[in-house]
Image (tube, coloured by chain):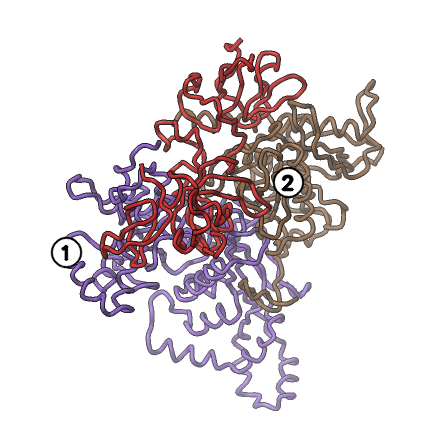
Amino acid sequence: MATSLPPVAIPGQRLGSIVAYSAGPGTHVQQSNIYASIAGPVVVDPAQSKTQTKATLRVSRILSGTPQISPASSAPIKQKPRYNTLPAVDSIVLARVTRVQKRQATVSILVVLDETSATTSDPSKLASDNDNVASILTTAANPENHSSTDELRFQALIRKEDVRAVEKDRVVMDEMFRVGDIVRGSVLSLGDQSFYYLTTARNDLGVVMARSEAGNMMFPISWKEMRDPVTGAGEQRKVARPY
Amino acid sequence: MMADRRRINGPPGGTRPAVFASNLQSGTSATDRAQRQRQPSELRKIFLKTGLIPTASGSSYLEFEPSASLAAARANPKSLIPPSSALKLACTVHGPKPLPRSAAFSPNLVLTTHIKYAPFAARQRKGHIRDASERDLGVHLETALRGAIIAERWPKSGLDITITILEAEDDRWWGSAPDSHDASWGMMNVLAGCITAASAAIADAHIDCLDLVAGGVAALVSDDSASTSTVAPKLMLDTDPAEHRSILSACVVAYMPARDEITELWLKGDSSKASLEDGDDRTGHEALIDGAVDAARGAHAVLAEAVRESLLKTVGQA
Amino acid sequence: MAPPAATAAPSVPPSLSLPPSQFARLQPHAYLLGHLSPPSASNQPSIRANGRAPSQFRVTSANAGSLTHTNGSAVVRIGDTAAVCGVRAELLHTEDIASWSVSQASGSNKRRRLADLGEKPTEEDEDEDPEEDRAHIEDLNLLVPNLSLSTGCAPGFIPGAAPSALAQSLSHQILSLLHSTRLVRADDLRVWYQPPNLGPEELERHNDEEQMDVDAEQSATAEEKPREIKAFWVLYIDIMIISLAGNPFDAAWAAVLAALRDTKLPKAWWDVDNETIVCSDSVADARKLSLRGLPVASSYGVFEADAAAGWRANVIPDAVEENAQAQKDKKGSPERWILADPDGYEEGLIQERACVVIDKEKDGKTTIVKMEKNGGWTVDTEDLRQLVEMSARRWDEMKRILEQC
């Protein structure tokens, strides 16, 4: 049965019957048949657990050369199917701090760290806009007005109570984040029409890159402090555990 | 009219397009009207390529094959008046990106379409500001695409589709007096091209679609040979308005072959006088829609080929 | 979790192990700096993130004459930046020019023209009065360039909105370069009319009315009535930037140049019966513009290793000494790079820009047509000399490309 599957598909191409497969990301069902909804390599994910009886058909956004018949071991059971490249609940994102207020920090999401991209060996081969150096090099700069680029990025809030897991009531936002810091966060919820909500209340989450007041890149020295290698001065941050 | 201070304006008194001596001599014209060399159901070739504009999430460039008379005029230029023109357009897709702050929450992908003619795209110089017909085209395109996109896969985000027409189709033969026909038939060919090109660019951007939706045009034309109006109009596919004396009715569809579904239909003119083959008991407009669908099937083949080609190229590179 | 990125970006702090793509997005300045100043031990050449050498321009192509409804057209691609230019000629009748009859009646132009000719007999422009040429082209707005970025060429430009500040500025730069290079000759745009000689009776009547000396006037008019300008061609030069990936000016100007070189104007004359200008549609009658030279624009950006250093030295006096020390320490490795033809990524990291417009005469002598530098102070006279040399090499390349298209 799997032999009749095409290696690649284009939108509207019939892939198989729902009798044989479940429909995964990049496909849709029409009159008991699974059709491709994006262009890409066709991937069969074998049935995962006892509850699933059918293999899942999906069309990958990742245009790598080898057809991805993903071995069962590499696909964690808790992983949810991703139907788009947007930030979703539990997505890990990298974001730049654009505003720090008393009760919250506003950030602009730069990169959605896809689970798939984290497990693939060479991220530069991904076609997704997030992970392709060439496409970043051509699209990164908005020549018109650099401040307006944030309007093209998804915005998120880190509320005071979501900054860290301990001593929540003693959080002072100015000592956690500064404008320009790069923060690794996890998406809590899709929020309202304009903001996602992020949390940094985990050891591996928080500031990953920051410049000191003197303008130098700092390195982390503890979970709440970073240091300027030139001036030697320390600054407070909610630091992500480096690894 | 107020001078537009954000653009460079020409002479304040305005300018006049060139008037050719050959046009002043009424009745006879220097150049004969372009004649259709194709069979009634024969389509023009379409050149379509995706991914040429890397700053966009998706892009495409589309060109219609020049008519036989235009190709001849290019190969051996005699007159400065082109016999017909051939559609050329570029399409970009930006997004999915955040909706503007002022926008309400949307659980779906919000589509914005925008079609603009370059000032030099048509026989008459176009203005810099979008006119009613360009807005109209944008609305038709949006309807055509909205039926094909799986919008619920992309919550609270927006997708901008922008098309720049570098060369438009003629609305009629240039030698006819401007008031000799009512409708702007060329717009329908432009729309068909826009649908096909936008579909390719959306696929290039990896936005989920039910199918590659393609545009097609058919028309009822009444071709002269000095005869009276007793000659009943004939059905032709992919008509170039410059090649016909009189178009009575035309239809453009956006069509998804995988589902046999029409997402957009636009029919103009009087389709009641169609002369169909014996035994064909379809009404004029039925025949016209079927013809447009046939033309769209042809465009779909080109579209699928272009999307597949760019996919295989990317997969091959990786 | 993620593979090491040390190869692409040597200056990554130890806390980070991001793939290069993410590093490029998060720390663009450090990413580009990492490429331009590879560790001295690695023996790698200084190369830009896009793989080009600092003085290297992107691959350029040009194609002219493919748009049906234009008098001249061209498509120019410089790397991923693409510009389409269409030239459309329309007629400006002198009777539609409000001030025309006044300025002509004064006749002052004619007299000065003779005087100029006597002083400096120039080779090519012998029958052109530079002042009249300028006055006609500039004061009458005969060249009308407009550049559009509302084409979806890059995210951030809203289609349908008024021209952005960048689009307006580019349009004006093109206009002023068209004027200062005097690329288009006013005489190519003039439509002349030679009135027939009037009969003697009529002449008599005229003279009576004007109460002039009959004898003196007769000798003048017997030769020929002076010919007059009945109309001008106005060139609408529209540039659509179809794809924007940095340095739009070079691409736009090259497209304008190629389109003007492709432009043909129909033969036009004053039709006495219809009292209007009439044109011939014959290609054989039409003529090309005779442009003055081939001015080629080359743009550069200056990338600084520490963009803030210069400012600190001036704004915070205490830092000067420290900064001077740092300069000394880093001697040998440059603090800044001049990048030819910057792409969109580089443009976002550049404060100082320079644009040099070069032309070469037949004997190969280089002429600087325009030089512009803004946004910083690191480029000195030696650098400018280098820029001119690079631009001169670029001119040779562009000449070849434009002559083939």
At numbered mark 2, what does the secondary structure look like: helix, strand or loop? Answer: helix
In the rendering, which numbered label is found on residue B220?
A: none
At numbered mark 1, what does the secondary structure look like: helix, strand or loop? Answer: helix
Label 2 crowd (10 A; few <14 / some 14-19 / many >=20): many
Relative horizontal placement of residue A75, taking residue C317 as reference (left or right): right
Relative horizontal placement of residue B116, taking residue B288 as reference (left or right): left
Please say if the residues under marks 2 and 1 sit with CB atoms less than 8 Å apart.
no
Q: Picture coordinates of residue C368 (x, y %)?
A: 30, 63
Q: Which of B236 and B199 is in front in this view?
A: B199
| Chain drawn purple in the picture | C
For the point 16% across and 61% down, which residue is it?
A: C325
Label 1 crowd (10 A; few <14 / some 14-19 / many >=20): few
In this rendering, the label closer to the viewer, 2 or 1: 1
**Up-down: is A83 above or below A208?**
above
Q: Picture coordinates of residue C2 (x, y %)?
A: 34, 33
Q: Mark 1 lies on which chain?
A: C
**Up-down: is B101 above or below B57?**
below
Relative horizontal placement of residue A34, taking residue C51 as reference (left or right): right
**Up-down: is C169 above or below A207?**
below
Q: Which chain carries label 2?
A: B
Q: Quadrant of the N terminus of chain B?
A: bottom right
| Palette colour of chain A | red
Which image quadrant for residue A173? bottom left
Q: Which residue position holds label 2?
A: B190
Q: Which residue position holds label 1?
A: C329
Tell me which amino acid carries mark 2: Val
Tell me which amino acid carries mark 1: Asp
| Chain drawn brown in the picture | B
